[in-house]
Image: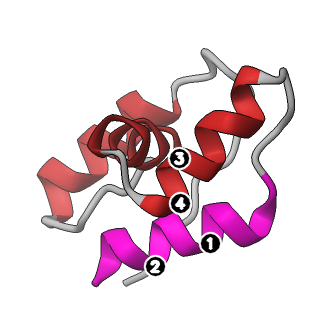
Amino acid sequence: MRMVILGRQGSGKGTQSERLTDRFGCVHLSTGDALRAAVSAGTELGRQAKAIMDEGGLVGDDIMNGIVRDRLA
């Protein structure tokens, strides 16, 4: 089973994801959590993302896709 939950900040994505994880035993992957973990761990992609965020920019899809790929590996 694959699910994608989208919504604005504060819309309950995390709450619903937690409930679905508890009920169906699926994996919950939060891109925000994965991004923060990569930055904290000082990975190459995390350092690139931090540099962009420090300048006030948004992290691009190429970096985020790499962070998610690393998280799923």
Please tell me which residue is depicted at 37% across the width and 84% down the height of the picture. Answer: 1
In front: mark 1 or mark 4? 4
Q: Earlier in the sequence, mark 1 or mark 4?
A: 4
| Distance Cα–Cα, label 1 vs label 4 | 10 Å
Residue 4: x percent and y percent? 57, 63
Tell me what residue is drawn at x 37 percent, y 45 percent.
17
Question: Does 11 sit left or right of 43 as displayed?
Answer: right
Along the line of sight, the residue nearer the viewer: 47 or 32: 47
From the image, tell me which residue sits under label 1.
Answer: 65
| Callouts 2 and 1 close, C-beta under 8 Å | yes
Residue kind at label 2, given as amino acid type: Arg
Q: Quadrant of the C terminus?
A: bottom left
Q: Amino acid at mark 1?
A: Asn
Q: Which numbered disc flags the more N-terminal residue, 3 or 2?
A: 3
21 to 68, vertically: above or below: above
Of tags 2 and 4, which is closer to the observer?
4
Amino acid type for the residue under numbered disc 4: Leu
Between residue 40 and residue 73, name the one nearer to us. 40
Residue under label 3: 47
Which region is colored magenta? Answer: 60-73
Q: Position of residue 6 (x, y in %)?
A: 68, 47
**Gap in angstroms between the C-alphas marked 3 and 1:** 15 Å
Sequence-wise, which precedes: disc 3 or disc 1? 3
Q: Secondary structure at mark 4?
A: helix
Q: Secondary structure at mark 1?
A: helix
Q: CA distance from mark 2 to mark 1?
A: 6 Å
The percent position of residue 62, horizontal first and vertical second, equals 74, 71
